[in-house]
């Protein structure tokens, strides 16, 4: 008799839930004691819609974001297994090891296993692992004692659940059956349940007709509304967003729907390579929402990062002011930590209400809650929750680097970061430092130039430049940069100074190379 795929899925879900329940015991036994033996399997997969991900420059190299977890090797009996789609340069690996462990990281190197699928095709890394029995065998061999091992990922989907069941290890992340809370539609439902303010709009839109009615209804409720945002449920870093303008809209409701439909081809998509036809196709495929485009004389985009541990306790991890770009300022470029003191406690408090709802539903691991904050003249700030990201995000890796490099901790009472000996620390960072000037430089060359000009992070002062996404530099002229300092102003100044010096050194290097190529 043929096997029933639904029975297989039900068995997989039950096995996964059993693994997740076992993680509570591991968490109690191991996580509170840094000297305990443990293994962390890092599957750096971005298991998101690949059409959406394809709009992100150098997307394959975003698997390097989780290299920050190599700093866990500071723990004397911790082993890390890091799996990626393509090989990661030894220069990059050694850079992260030396960042966390100083000039002699050999002992840590012995506890690190780097594995790759030698496959840069635009598919989820986890999918690539699952179709390679030899890769699964290599991971199983490296894991050792499963009762002391867990898996961590960028996000958890059915693919990661299947891999966890195959390997027999729990995941420090959210059960994929709960991922609906992290969609744009699910976020609005969670905000409603948590009692936090969020923009007027509509969720669970499944095609053009739903979109037309939602936009027309929104305009009818708010006759003065100038713009609305349309978002795909599974959009990534703002690339799944589009802006709709109501300029010239009729005042009577009867003709409004027809007017909206006629102007959908003019939808301004944040991803420049996407047009209305492709956007409509993805809206039908994954669904989406419409909401008011929040406006104000002063406008910010703060976020809060939180964690639910295996025992169900909720902890705030950080607040950030996001740095956004794109056609209408909705694409994530980087962040400043912590968020503005004028509102960071308010953001943390609102996010904790949302986290309470998610924890009751069984959500586990790190996630983020994004806001739009506006004010006019000297009026108080107004905050609108706009989405939940049930995964690690763009604010995860820079915060992990800060925590691991300084040994400091987040103070939830002041929503600031304190180091043991050097006081507060802040940072300014971006994933999107991109110039034609950088193309052709190898990761090793980039790191050497930055080291030679003295801008890299100095452990003795807990200040300086930390580089990431370094593998993208050669072919895409892109990498990430984070500057850690004592105050937000100092971090911004340090960032701009370091980038200017780095650019100057690269230009001088290029000119020197060009001169040596000249005929005698």
Image: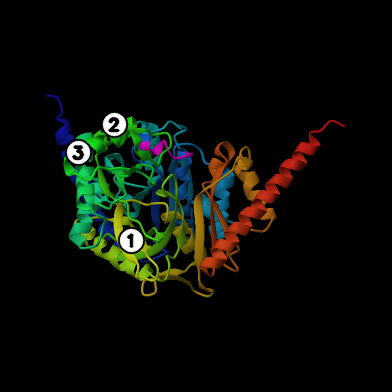
Residue for badge 1: 306
The foreground one among 312 and 270 is 270
Inter-mark Cα distance, 1 to 3? 45 Å
Q: Tell me the quarter of the picture where residue 278 sits.
A: top left
Quarter of the image where the N terminus is located: top left
Residue depth check, mark 1 versus mark 3: number of the one nearer the observer = 3
Residue depth check, mark 2 versus mark 1: number of the one nearer the observer = 2
Q: Report crowding for label 3: few under 14, some 14 to 19, many 20 or more residues within 10 A (C-alpha).
A: few
- SS at mark 2? helix
The foreground one among 498 and 210 is 210
Query: At x 44% / y 34%, what residue is drawn?
Result: 117
Q: Is residue 457 left or right of residue 166?
A: right
Q: Position of residue 189 (x, y in %)?
A: 20, 53
Tell me if residue 456 can be seen.
no
The image's mark for residue 281 is: 2
Residue 506 vs 283, above or below: the answer is below
Q: Position of residue 178 (x, y in %)?
A: 22, 49
- SS at mark 1? strand
The foreground one among 306 and 365 is 306
Inter-mark Cα distance, 2 to 1? 33 Å
Assign the magenta stretch its main secondary structure: loop
Residue depth check, mark 3 versus mark 2: number of the one nearer the observer = 3
Q: Was residue 356 drawn as part of the magenta stretch in this picture?
A: no
Q: What range is drawn magenta here?
A: 52-58
Of the numbered discs 1 and 3, the one sitting upstream in the chain is 3
Of the numbered discs 2 and 1, the one sitting upstream in the chain is 2
Quarter of the image where the C terminus is located: top right
- Give the total of numbered labels: 3
Q: Was residue 53 drawn as part of the magenta stretch in this picture?
A: yes
Query: At x 57% / y 50%, what residue is drawn?
Result: 94
The image's mark for residue 255 is: 3
């Amino acid at each position: 008799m043929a096997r029933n795929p639904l029975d297989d899925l039900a068995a997989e879900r039950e096995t996964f839930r059993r693994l997740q329940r076992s993680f509570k015991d591991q968490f109690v036994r191991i996580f509170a004691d840094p000297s305990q033996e443990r293994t962390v399997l890092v599957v750096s997969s971005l298991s998101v819609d690949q059409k959406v991900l394809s709009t992100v420059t150098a997307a394959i190299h975003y698997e390097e974001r989780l290299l920050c977890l190599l700093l866990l090797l500071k723990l004397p009996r911790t082993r890390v297994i890091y799996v990626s789609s393509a090989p990661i340069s030894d220069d990059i690996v050694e850079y992260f090891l030396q960042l966390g462990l100083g000039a002699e990281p050999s002992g840590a190197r012995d506890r690190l296993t780097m594995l790759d699928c030698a496959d840069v095709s635009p598919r989820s890394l986890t999918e690539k692992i699952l179709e390679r029995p030899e890769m699964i065998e290599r991971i199983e061999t490296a894991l050792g004692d499963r009762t002391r091992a867990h898996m961590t990922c960028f996000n958890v989907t059915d693919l990661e659940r299947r891999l966890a069941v195959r390997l027999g290890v729990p995941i420090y992340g959210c059960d994929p059956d709960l991922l609906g809370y992290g969609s744009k539609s699910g976020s609005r439902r969670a905000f409603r349940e948590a009692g936090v303010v969020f923009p007027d709009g509509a969720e669970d839109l499944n095609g053009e007709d739903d979109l037309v009615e939602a936009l027309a209804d929104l305009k009818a409720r708010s006759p003065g509304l100038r713009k609305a945002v349309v978002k795909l449920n599974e959009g990534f870093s703002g690339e799944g967003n589009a802006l709709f303008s109501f300029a010239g809209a009729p005042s009577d409701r009867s003709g409004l729907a027809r007017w909206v439909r006629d102007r959908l081809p003019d939808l301004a998509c944040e991803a420049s390579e996407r047009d209305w036809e492709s956007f409509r196709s993805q809206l039908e495929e994954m669904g989406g929402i419409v909401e008011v485009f929040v406006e104000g004389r002063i406008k910010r985009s703060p976020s809060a990062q939180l964690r639910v541990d295996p025992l169900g306790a909720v902890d705030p991890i950080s607040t950030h002011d996001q740095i956004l770009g794109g056609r209408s300022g909705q694409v994530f470029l980087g962040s400043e930590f912590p968020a503005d003191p004028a509102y960071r406690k308010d953001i943390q408090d609102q996010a904790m209400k949302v986290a309470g709802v998610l924890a009751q539903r069984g959500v586990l691991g790190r996630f983020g809650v994004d806001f739009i904050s506006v004010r006019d003249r000297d009026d108080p700030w107004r905050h609108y929750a706009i989405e939940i990201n049930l995964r690690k995000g763009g604010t995860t890796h820079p915060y992990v680097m800060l925590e691991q490099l300084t040994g400091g901790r987040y103070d939830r009472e002041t929503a600031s970061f304190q180091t043991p000996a050097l006081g507060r620390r802040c940072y300014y960072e971006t994933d999107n430092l991109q110039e034609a000037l950088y193309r052709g430089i190898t990761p090793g060359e980039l790191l050497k130039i930055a080291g030679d000009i003295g801008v890299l992070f100095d452990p003795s002062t807990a200040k300086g430049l930390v580089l990431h996404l370094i593998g993208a530099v050669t072919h895409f002229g892109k990498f990430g940069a984070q500057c850690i300092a004592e105050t937000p102003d100092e971090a911004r100044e340090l960032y701009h100074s370091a980038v200017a010096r780095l650019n100057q050194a690269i230009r001088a290097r290029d000119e020197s190379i060009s001169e040596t190529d000249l005929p005698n």
